[in-house]
Amino acid sequence: MIALSVAAALAVFILYTSVAGAGTPQLQPSDLAVHSQGDIMLVGTVVGSPAGDAHAAGGLHFVLKDAKGKHTAARVPVSYTGTVPDLFRTGREVVVEGTLRNGTFVAKPGTLSTKCPSKYAPAPAKKST
Amino acid sequence: MTIALVLAALLAVLAVAFVARPFLREPAPVSDRLDELSEPERRRLELAEERDRALEALKELEFDHRTGKVSDDDYRLLVGPLRRRAAETLRALEPRAEARHERITSSH
Amino acid sequence: MAALGRAALLLSFGLIAYALVAGSFAAWKRRRRLALSAQNALIAAFGTTVVAALVLWTALWRHDFSFVYVADHTSRTLPLGYRLSAFWSGQEGSLLLWLVVLTGYSALAVWLNRRTRDLVVWVVPMLAGISTFFVFMLCFISSPFTTAAAPADGAGMNVSLQNPYMLAHPPLLYLGYVGLSIPFAFAMGALLSRRTDERWIVVTRRWTLAAWTFLGVGQLVGSHWAYVEIGWGGYYAWDPVENAALMPWLAATAFLHSVMIQEKRGMLKVWNMVLVALAFNLSIFGTFLTRSGVINSIHSFAQSSIGSWFLGFIVICVVFSVGLIYLRLPLLRTKTKLESLVSREATFLYNNLLLVALCLTILWGVMFPVLTQAVRGETRSVSKPYYNFFLHSFGLPLLLLMGIGPLVAWRRASLRALGKTFLIPAIASVVTGGTLIALGYGSSIPGLLAYTFGAFVAASIALEFVRGTRARHSLSGGSWLGALVELVGRNRRRYGGYIVHASILMLAIGIAGSSAYQTVRERGLHQGQSMEVAGYTLTYERLQTRQEANAVATRAVVDVSRGGSHVTTLYPGKNDYPVEQQVSNEVSIYHDPRNLGDLFTIADQIDKNGTLFLKVLNKPLVNLVWGAGFLFVFGALVAMWPDAVEQRKLAERYAPGAAAA
């Protein structure tokens, strides 16, 4: 029975990954120097002052640095349109999905979410459903 | 601070007393052995469960038949073996009942 | 007073450690008084833990900011209800809540079953072992009773937590999570005592059902909180912390079903042991995920070292469970085999396979970042498309099975009989499917399948009640209602189960409608402008600002009309909390009686010049999701309700020497 369940799960899983690819890499700004192709989930802390309007044509512009680890010098500019979570501000750790284009991380609309700084409190703005 | 200490001490005393209770109530018991199920008792329990299982299966078959889930043909096919199984388990339990009855009456 | 709390917890530690060590020794060496003493220690530990809990609650009530915990999680302006619920809003307090529930459940379970001495003698050290970890953490790693110089005011509670649903969510969830420890402990106890009978299943049946119900309701309450409070328009985001509660629930669902097979046919003993261990270990894993920062989740708590302690405990639990089951394998072997692939046993097996497969794929998805980091040195993650794929692949067949199962007989079902019983539900589903396609619902295949299968299930359940009532009526006469009541009364587990299935059906339809057939529109509006969503016209009239107790509330006044006539006015907006320096999203929802759904409005952004970026979602049938919760609880209560006839039978079976009477 156990073997059957695992087999069933694995079979469907293999089917899925062969079709859809194996997940999206989660990277920090310092990693982008090495890995810059394809769909990426960028994790970082907001530095400086965000400028622009996420609902206007130009989008919201902010800069991310590594949230943890040793490479704190790396900086990546991000261009974002869509819903901005309530907790978004300088110093917050955020996650955003998108691709790197000409040195700027162009985000997929609506994929920005923040991690709450304190214990026990989620506060994201996510894609619908 | 002192109230806290007093309460804590009280709590500790109550806890220790409760834990020691079995030893305090029976300082010198006849037997300190924890009974476990003997082999015949284990077997009887398993048989009792099998008996209940067989009887339950019969009841469900009747019910399923009455509500139309099991057709007349299927019912006729299934009810025989189930009845036999139930009878077997009932019979298997009886000798033990008889044996125990004998033991009790002989010890009086 | 903190000293009393610390002392009480240390006493709990001593009692629990004693229960573990003395209890194990007593079980091994068959010492009656020592076993009783260990049992008393476990029960006493509940008392001392409650004292510790009362100390914390008193401190919260009285604003005792010398308690670091109270200062960190409450403030002078926090209302009493939320002050008291701050008990479980932080790491240390929630661990204490876990311990209170665990020792409480343990004391009750052991006390109720004290006469089954040879089983309980092993259950006591098992439960003590689990409790040891939590009390150790509370005493030495993560104490709620650390003190410091009292600040003038506390840090306050995160505003999004100040919501009645979030107040109820952790206790409900814990009553579920922790409840799974009881059947686990009894199962392992049965293995340790080498008992091969079903006693452990019989005595833990209601515990499992209750824990499962609490876990389900707890998750539903949490989703509802996310829906109304966080307000992104959804209620489940496949976040690791959400999955953390779903996985043990799925495993427990599988367990609930497969123990029925063990009771009826004596089969699947090894499988049941594995499932109950899986459910328990997933419950600990679940709380580990939520507390440590190991998976990058938006819900992650502080990246503290507490994660490594939990990981160590999980490893011990898994090794112990697997080891014990392996050692006792010979005891669990049975001769009974599955007679036919077309039988109710078989449908239960398929149900189990699907549930466990879904559980494992979710686990795989949750662990994916950790595994890829370890194997490839690069963290990769999966998201909604992954989970939805598997939810559809496994969930839709599960939905259909809920309708098939009741129609199939035990042991062996002939295809001809199946044809007869399947006829009406099959017609219902085909008709529903055809009608829906004609109405344009073919836009979403999973949605269409969910509705079609749902029709099958609904018909199947309805037929069960009708057939059963008819049979009862022909036996005992009286009114039809009386027959129905008697039918359910005599078969509480079966018909309670059907009611629960109906609630899951409701849930599935609600989810399908609100995800597969929802409409989302986003527009930037100036004052006076309108937008159209699903036949509704929403007009942004003006902004209003209001000063509330601790926030500045900005609301957009949005007029909603349909076909020219006014339906309602909605007020989506934002709250600005100057003290906490936070802005919160305040959604405005219209419960639409036309489609049992919601018109969900979010003020995404309000510009200084008054331009409103309004996001509107039309979510058909979403209120079925919440309604399902009530039906779920009702069905579970019916299934759990004590049955005097059944109790008598069980007493006779397990009473020693009863056959002689």
Image (tube, coloured by chain):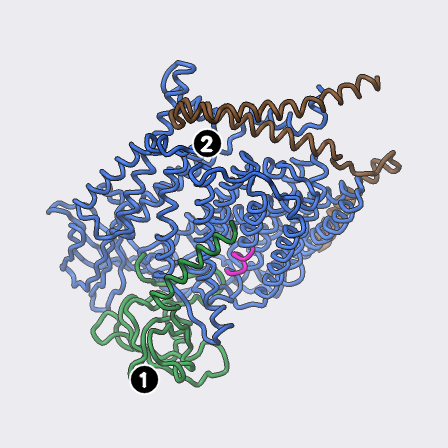
Chain colours: A green, B brown, C blue
Q: Is residue C603 above or below residue B78?
A: below
Q: Position of residue C425 (x, y in %)?
A: 30, 35
The reply to whether the magenta stretch includes residue C285 is yes
Give the residues in magenta: C284-289
- Say left or right for A3 vs C134: left
Name the residue type under label 1. Gly
- Say left or right for C85 vs C39: left
* Chain letter, disc 1 residue: A
Badge 2: how crowded within 10 Å, few (<14), some, or many (20+)?
some
According to the image, label 1 marks what residue? A103
Number of disc labels: 2
C25, C389: nearer the viewer: C389
Query: Residue at coordinates 78% horizontally, 48% vertically from top-left?
Result: C25
Q: Nearer the viewer, mark 2 or mark 1?
A: 2
Can residue C51 be seen?
Answer: no
The reply to whether the magenta stretch includes residue C445 is no
According to the image, label 2 marks what residue? C494
Furthest toward the top, the residue is: C477
Furthest toward the right, the residue is: B28
* Residue C160: mark in rendering: none
Q: Position of residue C659 (x, y in %)?
A: 69, 22
Task: Tell me where residue C44 sits by quadrant.
Answer: top right
C456, C88: nearer the viewer: C456
Quadrant position of the N terminus of chain C in the picture: bottom right
